Image (tube, rainbow, N blue to C red):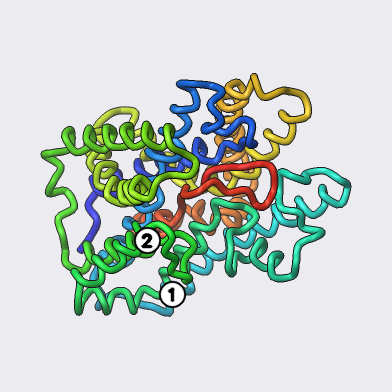
Amino acid sequence: MSVDQNISTRINLMRIFLISGIVFVHVPFDPATSAYAGGQGAFDWFRVLLGDSFFRIGVPCLSAISGYLLFRRGSEAFDYPKTVRTKVETLLAPFLIWNIGLFVFVALIQSQGAGIGFFPDLWHASFRQLTSYLFSLEEFPIDLPLYFLRDLFVCILLSPILAFLVRRAPVVTCVLLFGLAILPGVTIGLVLKKSILFSFTFGIALALYKVDVKALDRHAVLGAALTVLAATLLSVGLYLTGPDYPYLLDLARNTLSIVGALGFWLLSALATPTALGQRLANTGSLSFWIFCGHYPLLLMLWMTWRRFMDNDAYPVFYFGAIVLTFFILVVSNTLISRYLPSLYQVMTGSRGRKSRSSSEGQSMRSHTHPGTQWHTHKSAVKVNR
């Protein structure tokens, strides 16, 4: 089963849209500027809407696409050894390069007394903590969003088992993993974010059973509208009760993050024919560059801001940091890909390599992405994850 041009374009569009949304999710704050501190009114609710409701759908959605693309030609054409070798280059290598790079940078500035409270204290961490910060063996890496690459690589390693289960018992497999994904307080262990394992497996099921992923496009307006409405209503409940949500609201939040992926897919059907949609769909590896580079940049901006400004001006930081982050990443992506193409290929897992066939590139570039609870790295600064 091949991926037609419309599906390919929609996947590209969703990738840049959802990864751009992650920038909103990861804008840092401290306890005094938390959206639940009640100091900024409608602005705080807006932050909850984007960061803890609407864009939480992104990671499950991108995970499902990854599983779908991996088996789009069927299980007979799936070459496991070759796939693992490829994903070492396109997933594991960028994870290590960006994460170890940030780790070394943080260790250097902390040795000079800077960065304490913004990043985990590396000089007083245990060996076990350091291995997680470096390689995300048990906990989140120091470059927080890169957990998605880690979890996706784990799913790749498990893909033959997941495909076997889907072929033998698709309903039981998907229902079981869905239940594990949405239940608050339940951990799986293999992955840091449970929704990734379910969504990746569900994507495999769509591919193996040759489901027509455009069958519901005629309901695109209704589906997209219901998703936006559900995210809005959820954000109201989260804002009124957070950050310690009631069990049922937490369950609803986890459920929407997965089910809402359908609404995002239908939204892409509406946006793809537009001029803006076509332009965004042609941004190529920019989405991966934004994904890997936005978190360190946001933290650097936050460190600088906290030296000079007080909490009352936080909305200025929030919007200013987002605009500046996009500007820096778009410009740096253009310059480095043009003038340092070899370096760019290494940092993006060969996503800048023009000689790839479009179908192969589609599969590899799809593995880019990605909040559940407030994450502190045991420090004062906080971001959504």
Find residue 157 and name its label. 1
How many numbered dots are placed on residues in this image? 2
Q: Is residue 257 left or right of residue 352?
A: left
Residue 114 in sight: yes
Q: Residue at x 28, y 74 (%)?
A: 163
From this view, report whether residue 324 is shown above or below residue 92.
above
The amino acid at mark 2 is: Glu
In front: 322, or 363?
322
Quick one: label 2 or label 1, which is nearer the N terminus? 1
Q: Secondary structure at mark 2?
A: helix
Q: Which residue is mark 2?
A: 360
The amino acid at mark 1 is: Leu
Give residue 186's position: percent from left, percent from top. Answer: 41, 64
In front: 301, or 248?
248
Q: Is residue 136 left or right of residue 78?
A: right
Q: Residue at x 60, y 21 (%)?
A: 316
Residue 11 in sight: no
Quadrant in which residue 337 is drawn: top right
Q: Quadrant of the N terminus?
A: bottom left
Whether the residues at callouts 2 and 1 have beta carbons within 8 Å, the answer is no
Q: Badge 1 local density, few (<14 within 10 Å), some, or many (20+)? A: some
Give residue 189's position: percent from left, percent from top. Answer: 48, 70
Give residue 107's position: percent from left, percent from top. Answer: 79, 54
From this view, report whether residue 70 is shown above or below residue 245.
below
For the residues carrying marks 2 and 1, which lies nearer the camera in this image?
1
Give residue 383's position: percent from left, percent from top. Answer: 58, 42
Q: CA distance from mark 2 to mark 1?
A: 18 Å
Q: Residue at x 30, y 63 (%)?
A: 179
Quadrant in which residue 27 is drawn: top right
Q: Secondary structure at mark 1?
A: helix
Q: Is residue 125 left or right of residue 142?
A: right
